[in-house]
Amino acid sequence: DSGVTQTPKHLITATGQRVTLRCSPRSGDLSVYWYQQSLDQGLQFLIQYYNGEERAKGNILERFSAQQFPDLHSELNLSSLELGDSALYFCASSVAPRGDEKLFFGSGTQLSVL
Amino acid sequence: EDKVVQSPLSLVVHEGDTVTLNCSYEVTNFRSLLWYKQEKKAPTFLFMLTSSGIEKKSGRLSSILDKKELSSILNITATQTGDSAIYLCAGGTSYGKLTFGQGTILTVHP
C-alpha cells in the first residue's frame, strides 16, 4: 500500500458527461500528480500541483481541469467525456516539488466512457 | 518533445532465466532516470539513477545509467513468476516532469 488513496476505483459513464476523480496523497506529501494510462499511449503526465499551486502541466486537455485543496487532497475533473477518454487515471504524490523524484502511485481510477 | 522508448515491448521467459530490459531517452533538461514495476494497478518504485556508470542493486534486480548513450538497462537475474509485470522506465527533468516509456511486459513461466 503506497499510502495514496484514489476514489472511486471504477467509474462507468456516458459520452458528454462530467466526472470527478479524487486523490488523497500520502501523509506529509505536498506534491500531487495526475497521470493517464491507456493501452496505446502508456502513462501520460497530465498535471502537477505543489502545496495548492499548479506547478507543471503536461498533455492535459482543455476539457480536463484539476485543483489541490488546502488539506492537500486533489480532484481531477473531466468534462464533455468522449470514448477516447476511457483510461486508467493515476494520482501520485511526493514530498518535494520536483517531478523527477520517487513518486508513490495510488491504485488508479478505471474510467469507462460508453 | 521528450521521448522515452523501451525495448523489448514484451518478453516471455522461464523461471531462472536472466533478462535485460532496455530504455533510451531524449529528455530536455534531463536529471534522472527512474524504473517502476507495475503489477496489477499502481506502479511501484524500483530505482532512480542520476549518475552515469553507477549500478544500483536491489536483490536480483540491478540497473545502470549511461548518460553518453542516453540509455539505461534493468537486469533481473534468476527470474521468478512473481517478476511478471510491466516494467516502466521514465525520464525526469529538472523542472518537474516525468516522461514514461510504453513499458516492457515481462512474463515469467514456471
Image: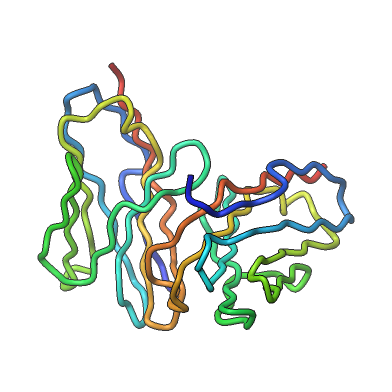
Percent across and percent down for residue B100 are: 43, 60
A9 left or right of A27 in image: right
- In which quarter of the view is residue A50 placed? bottom right
Q: How many marks?
A: 0
Q: Position of residue B76 (x, y in %)?
A: 20, 40
Asked if residue B3 lies left or right of residue A19, the reply is left
Instruction: Answer left or right for A74 relative to B74.
Output: right
Q: Quadrant of the C terminus of chain B?
A: top left
Q: Of all residues shown, which one is farthest toward the top? A: B110
Can you tell which quarter of the image residue A33 is in? bottom right
Q: Which color mode does the image show?
A: rainbow
A65 and A68: which is toward the camera:
A68
Going 34% across and 71% down the picture, which residue do you hit? B26
Taking the spot 41% from the left edge, 49% from the top edge, the residue there is B44
Query: Which residue lies at the image location 31% right of the left edge and 44% below the top edge?
Result: B8
Question: In x, y percent, where is residue A104?
Answer: 46, 57
- The one of A82 and B79 positioned closer to us in this rendering: B79
Q: Is residue A51 above or below residue A8?
A: below
- Placement of A101 over or under B61, stated as above or below: below
Q: Nearer the viewer, residue A48 or A83?
A: A48
Residue at 17 percent of width and 71 percent of height? B51
Q: Position of residue B50 (x, y in %)?
A: 23, 71
